[in-house]
Image (cartoon, helix red, strand yellow):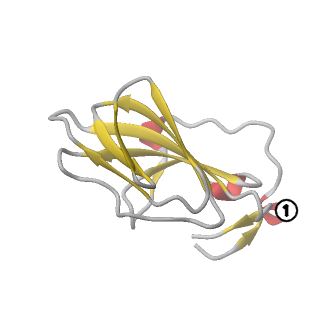
Amino acid sequence: MEWLDFKRIGDYSMYAVKFEDAEINPRSGNRMIVPRALTETLEAALVVRKKDEGTPLASHSDEEEIYIILKGKGRVRVGDEWREVGPNMALYIPRNALHEIQCISEEPLEYIYIANWPDTKGVYRS
């Protein structure tokens, strides 16, 4: 997707979508439940990983993230700290923190990530 200005898209008083109807990001496979193009600084996606699958080690200088674990169990690294996570847990990942998550259960790991770009109000990037 090209860079879009929030004002060109329009203002929304409410946006609601069933998870299964949300657009799938072709690169990540994540369901984009709240696309960044609809917000000023946020994005939310449903992530599903099978056993031994995970995300690559990453760090973002311009982004904070929150993970809300729905199903399954995972092993999360934030900085030098590792922790096991499971349903009904939330995790905050600050800017510049190296982080990754891997599914460690037979049941797929399902979580919602909420990303915030506080310095890029009103801009969408793919």
> Do we see residue 34 in this rendering?
no
Residue 2 falls in image quadrant: bottom right
Q: Residue furthest bottom?
A: 2
The residue lying at 46 percent from left, 37 percent from top is 19
Type of amino acid at the residue the image marks with label 1: Lys
Residue 6 falls in image quadrant: bottom right
Quadrant assignment for the N terminus: bottom right
Q: Is residue 7 above or below residue 53?
A: below
**Residue wearing tag 1:** 7
| Residue 12 located left or right of residue 52 | right
The residue lying at 81 percent from left, 65 percent from top is 8
Q: Position of residue 89 (x, y in %)?
A: 45, 27
Residue 62 falls in image quadrant: bottom right
The foreground one among 37 and 87 is: 87
Q: Position of residue 65 (x, y in %)?
A: 57, 49
> Do we see residue 27 in this rendering?
yes
The residue lying at 25 percent from left, 43 percent from top is 103
Q: Residue furthest top?
A: 88
Q: How many marks?
A: 1
Q: Position of residue 99 (x, y in %)?
A: 43, 56
